[in-house]
Amino acid sequence: MTARFRIVAIAMLFALAAASATAQDVPLFRWENFTTANGLPDNHVFCVLVDGNRIWAGTDNGLGLYENGRWKTFRPVDGLAHQAVLSLALDKRTGDLWVGTMGGLNRISAGRIDTFTQLNSGLSNDIVYGVGVHGDFVWVATAAGASRLNTRTGQWALFNERNTPMYEIWTYAVSPAEDKVYYAVWGGGVLEYDVKTERWKDYNDPDGETELVLMKDQGLIHEITTSVSYVDKILWVATYFGASRYDGRYWHNFLTKDSGLPSNFLSQIKGVDGNRAWFSTDKGLAYYDGENWAVYRPALDTHKPEMLVRDAAGNIKNIPVDTAPAHNYILGVDFQGDDLWVATGKGLSHGIRQQSMAKVLASQPQATKK
């Protein structure tokens, strides 16, 4: 064996080792899809929430509950404030489900459905885009500011341009955690509430450009924010023009041109931890593990199942798969152990985690460079 051949062989071994490492980080799924044909209330699914073995799906025509292989639907006739369900949150201490709709906020508790609106409560607006639970408090994102309900006392607090740095009041999503509560403000960046000091702070696009990204990692990538996810003291932000990650000191932004994002138009972002996150875009579901990317979707041209893996160097592999999420337009995700539940524009998808990614990648030809 010549020295040159040995060098090439060693390089190939390193490449295979790198592919194997990537395989361990990037999940592979078998997808099963639900539509109205098998019981889903409506094919347009705004949100999904995992509650143990129960799956809640907020759709354009009712709230669906999937349990023991069957669907049950809740609509206004059953006590729901409105048939369009935009957001869901679970109080893990009580088991209560909080449901944000186009006509108010619902609490489903032990089979009872309570409704909160502008007329009978301190809710700031009946269009409830986001809801989150933090201890005794339920935080709500509405079309006219933020609201907070103290479930122990029944007291409401309202937050808007008069008592926060919020210069736009269209709050689109909320993410409460132990020490902070974050709001995505559509057209107003991100709003941060410090639980300890009870003070508000805002984060905005530093270049102020509504169409172009002039300063990529100088701050929040864009002010039209659609979703926030705060986990392990890391803030993940989704916008209509890319995504951002903030560690409390530094921003890192993601665009299709320099990352594995399939589109800059995001509906939701869901952090797993400080390094890993899921991105719901209009061109597929994306996963990032801190270095590698994966995209799951029906192919944009053929509509056949497609999975793309992009490594840190920009090399892309097309992984052969037999199944894909129900549609490219992804609106939200939630986790059920290693599995995923995905809300799309044309159905609800269940991603069942597989364990054969290393074998799949090892059998693939050399990746192409993006």
Image (cartoon, rainbow, N blue to C red):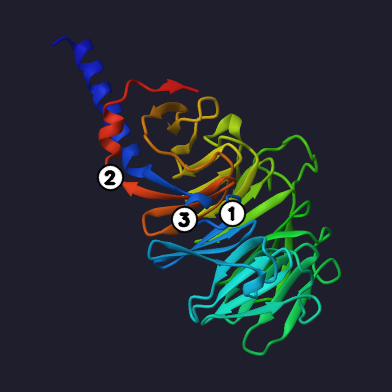
Q: Is residue 349 left or right of residue 146?
A: left
In front here: 147 or 5?
Answer: 147
Nearest the viewer among 120 and 28 is 120
Residue 175 rendering spot, x and y as whole percentages: 61, 64
Q: Is residue 169 above or below residue 12?
A: below
Q: Which residue is mark 3?
A: 272
Quick one: label 2 or label 1, which is nearer the N terminus?
1
Residue at 60% x, 69% y is 132
Q: Quadrant of residue 113?
A: bottom right
Q: Residue 355, which numbered label? A: 2
- Number of residues whose C-alpha sits closer than 10 Å to that of mark 2, classed few (under 14), some (14–19) or many (20 or more): few
Secondary-structure class at tag 2: loop
Residue 314 is left or right of residue 252, and the answer is left
Earlier along the polypeptide chain: callout 2 or callout 3? 3
Q: Nearer the viewer, residue 204 or 183?
A: 183
Mark 3 crowdedness (10 Å alpha carbons): few <14, some 14-19, many ≥20? some
For discs 1 and 3, the disc positioned in front in the rendered view: 1
Kind of residue indicated by mark 3: Val
Secondary structure under badge 3? Answer: loop
Image coordinates for residue 1, horizontal then vertical, percent: 13, 11
Q: Identify the mark at residue 42; answer none if there is no mark.
A: 1
Instruction: Identify the mark nearer the N-term, 1 or 3.
Output: 1
Q: Is residue 321 visible?
A: yes
